[in-house]
Amino acid sequence: MRPLIKPKALKPGDTIASISLSSGTAGMFPNRYQQGVRQIEEAFGIKVIPTPHALRSRDEIYNHPDWRLEDMMWAFENKDVKAILTNIGGDDTLRMLPLMTEKHFETIRNNPKIFMGLSDTTVNHMMCFKAGLGTFYSPSLLFGYAENGGIPEIMIENTKKTLFSTEPVGILPESKEFIVENVDFGLENPPKRERIPTTPWRYIQGEKTVSGPLIGGCADVLMNTIIGTKLWPDLDDFNEAILFLEDSEEQPPADWVLYWMRNLGAQGILERISGLLFARPGNNRFKNKEEEQKWLSKYPEFDKAILKGLKEFGRTDLPVVTNMDYGHTVPQLILPYGVKAEINPQKKTVSLLESGVV
């Protein structure tokens, strides 16, 4: 993998910028936005400010990918801003790409700082990857850090370890519970959402301990949006890497997972990577318990699709961990791009062997 610049660690008192790079949801739900800001400031002792257009209406954000790019550059160039946190994902971040010049990539490279988000923000992560900056696949402000009833403790501790410390992050913790019911961003006094027990991470293939730099993101975005553009990583970027993937709240069928595996295999990516991580299937809405159980039944179907695709390309040796706590699920862990990770199938651990910040 190409060498990536590590940004500086956060410290209490720092200022971070919230930004809308895809959907204008933050401007639609000011109560939810303020809840996220309050919880972040209380949990980490930092200040959150919006970029100039972050809280504009959904239509304005949609109609102005140029504003989004301006905000991204504003945040990277602003010396007072120590980190950038996306408000939420969406579905059209890629419309920023035709507006980007080499000067924009230089701005990112010359002003390295923590950049965070998930889902459609995968596009922005790949922009930063192309610029040579290591970023952080993480919760967003509205989805994750604005969780009803406070940020889950496992997320607070993981955020502190990953963004506020220069020590190796170490073994990633597994959550004993997760949240599946719908998030209503419009409530003024939202109730704490129900937590349900989860099953442990599943080490479905592989026996050998492996390590390598992390690369990946939301598979829906990588395989349906970024692929074929100049943001798609070079084949060499996958050499000995640990690929992390997750699916969105669109809830794609298991067949899609198999198609993704086949595409990665046909590109020669599966033969290059040293390990594969897959998150708990994404969700955000259920009308009843039957829908919830139907969603939960995807777990084994996703696993079967992954294993079938790997077998078709001769990678029955590849260590694979599924059902992990990152992506479109709550709680969410942070995965830093380019940081060396380790999968130990015998001990059933996934670790970050170095820090994500300096």
Image (spheres, rainbow, N blue to C red):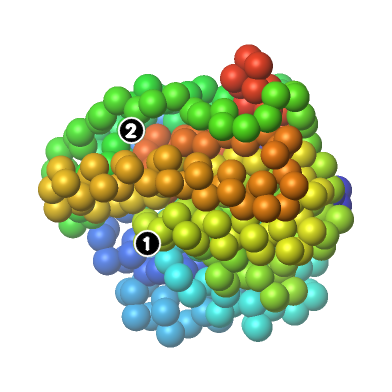
Q: Which mark is residue 178?
A: 2
Give the Cα separation between the discs numbered 2 and 1: 18 Å
User: Along the horizontal axis of the image, is 213 left or right of 195?
Assistant: right
User: Along the horizontal axis of the image, is 354 left or right of 194?
Assistant: right
Could you say whether the residue bearing mark 1 is in a helix, strand or loop?
Answer: loop
What's the residue type where badge 1 is placed?
Glu
| Residue 224 or residue 4, whichever sits in front | 224
Where is residue 246 shown, x and y percent of the image?
Answer: 51, 49
Where is residue 344 shown, x and y percent of the image?
Answer: 68, 22
Dot 1: few (<14), some (14–19), or many (≥20) neighbours within 10 Å? few
Q: Is residue 126 above or below residue 169?
A: below
Q: Which mark is residue 151?
A: none
Could you say whether the residue bearing mark 2 is in a helix, strand or loop?
Answer: strand
Where is residue 205 shown, x and y percent of the image?
Answer: 62, 32
* Residue 199: quadrant of the picture: top left
- Identity of the residue drawn at 45% across and 55% down: 254
Where is residue 49 shown, x and y percent of the image?
Answer: 46, 53
- Identity of the residue drawn at 33% across and 33% down: 178
Location of the C terminus (image quadrant)? top right
Residue 224 visible in rendering = yes
- Identity of the residue drawn at 27% across and 42% down: 180
User: Along the horizontal axis of the image, is 76 left or right of 46?
Assistant: right
- Identity of the residue drawn at 34% across and 74% down: 58
| Residue 169 or residue 265, whichever sits in front | 265
What's the residue type where badge 2 is placed?
Phe
Of all residues shown, which one is farthest toward the top? Answer: 347
Q: Is residue 52 above or below residue 141?
A: below
User: Along the horizontal axis of the image, is 24 left or right of 247?
Assistant: left
Q: Which residue is mark 1?
A: 250
Q: Nearer the N terminus, badge 2 or badge 1? A: 2
| Residue 78 or residue 168, whichever sits in front | 168
Dot 2: few (<14), some (14–19), or many (≥20) neighbours within 10 Å? many
